[in-house]
Image: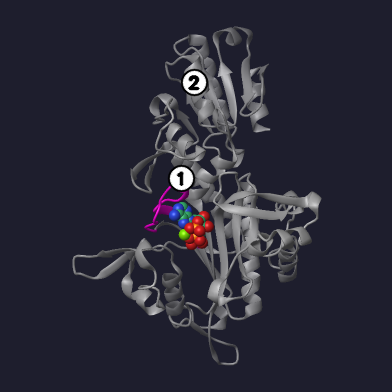
Amino acid sequence: MRLSPAVRLSEYFLPTLREVPSEAEIVSHRLMLRAGMVRQEAAGIYSWLPLGFRVMKKIEQIVREEQDRIGAAEVLMPTMQPADLWRRSGRYDGYGKEMLRIQDRHDREMLFGPTNEEMITDIFAEHARSYKNVPLMMYHIQWKFRDEVRPRFGVMRGREFLMKDAYSFDLTPEDGRVSYNKQFLAYLRTYARMGIKAIPMRADTGPIGGDLSHEFILLADTGESEVYCDQEFLDIDPLSAEVDIRDPDAVQKVADRYNALYARTDELHEPAVFEEQVPEERRYVGRGIEVGHIFFFGTKYSDPLNAKVTTSDGQSAPVLMGSYGVGVSRLVGGIIEASHDDKGIVWPEAVAPFQVALINLRVGDAGCDSACEDLFAKLQAAGIEVIYDDRDERAGVKFADMELIGIPWQIVVGPKGVKNGVVEVARRGADGRDEMAPDAAVARIAG
Ligand code: ATP
Ligand code: MG
């Protein structure tokens, strides 16, 4: 999906607020409301306004590209599911009040999907028959509904939320581990590309056992999860480790390296264990937000839903599965928690709604208008996404709005500069403005 490469603010819908909304408890929720990114429709249910929508789509696209890179095939399953499918897996009754149950006009029992293990397993069971169909990974990016007891923190704990969920299908535990590790690496790359630190923490696998579950925790002081880890862990740059994902050994080696740097999350919560495992100078204690959760669960769904494949020697075996979730809409709030200042949001470049805000200080002045039109066209030609503030507003309002919505670069065009053939360039989060010729400004931002 291609987002509009350029917008004029006079034609855009950016309902920013000066005052701080009182209903919002945490900074990301306040800033999302003030920046006009979302509007609450009911508890935990939001409309995504133009600016919020753009950021969500950017995040979604990074997630998609990294899933595609490891060979996962994108599908789209519906939000509505038949209750019977969940009866067959045995989860319908146990799921409880978090599941929104609905009846259609024929009194058939339906539900708004909180997740899709059952449906994807059923799809696999119908169409895949042999060992030749695996290894296989499929994913979709779709709205989920969970009737959370306490929806809060804006989009971070919503009831309706956008999730990427991927599923792996393998014949042997060894292959299953390779699929898991591919996802593990894809997650490291996904978050690093978004410009954030999200660290994998070994998670409890519950009654199924085994150690193949990790939560990915985005570091932020306001997070719900406690983080205890080795500082060395935070210093690794996942993008620098270019791994050949077709090589199972290479994939395993990287996953092992990460796993070696920390013990089980719950064990590290024990001060004694933490102190024993991590040298004092490398102990990191903080808080974070769960932005992803990956899980290998073997035959949990393939057994009851009868998803089997024939092996090369003609036997029949249930397929081994894993599931891999990313909280796409939660990340919008999460990234703001991790990256803001007293003026507003500071978007990492990769997820910023636009790269540059073009600010016309005197709309109606022929020189300013034509310099801005010229820059507006040149920025687009250079592939830079631009929001052009062509509103008839005071300079102070324009600066405050563009800082609030966190645009990484500003180009400021005023009558004095236009006479001297220069514009001002500023970087969000840095002090000072540099004067330069308009072409140099485009080059600086493109570079
Ligand atoms: P949590 O412990 O935060 O409730 P979970 O364990 O229920 O999360 P999963 O079922 O693993 O979450 O879902 C995958 C991802 O979806 C989570 O890592 C999280 O980022 C996101 N997610 C889960 N619940 C919500 C929600 N209510 N609102 C927004 N995002 C959510
Ligand atoms: Mg939950």
- Residue at image position (63%, 79%) is 173
Q: Which residue lies furthest to the bottom in this view?
A: 314
Q: The disc labelled 2 sits on which kind of residue?
A: Lys
Q: Which residue lies furthest to the front in this view?
A: 272
- Residue holding disc 1: 153
Residue 97 shown left or right of residue 354 in the figure: left
Q: Which of 176/16 is in front?
A: 16
Name the disc covering residue 398, or none: 2
- Residue at image position (46%, 70%) is 117
- Residue at image position (43%, 37%) is 37
- Quadrant position of residue 79: bottom left
Front label number (2 vs 1): 1
Q: Is residue 188 visible?
A: yes
Residue 196 shown left or right of residue 253 in the figure: left
How many residues crowd mark 2 within 10 Å: few (<14), some (14–19), many (20+)?
Answer: many
| Residue range highlighted in magenta | 146-165
Q: The disc labelled 1 sits on which kind of residue?
A: Phe
- Quadrant position of residue 77: bottom left
Q: Which of 356/27 is in front?
A: 27
The relative height of residue 294 versus residue 10 in the rendered view (above or below) is below
The relative height of residue 220 versus residue 319 in the rendered view (above or below) is above
Q: On the rendered image, what quadrant is the C terminus found in?
A: top right
From the top left corner, tell me how far across and down residue 127 is, in percent.
45, 77
The relative height of residue 120 versus residue 421 in the rendered view (above or below) is below
Q: Is residue 351 visible?
A: no
- The secondary structure type at the circle numbered 2 is helix
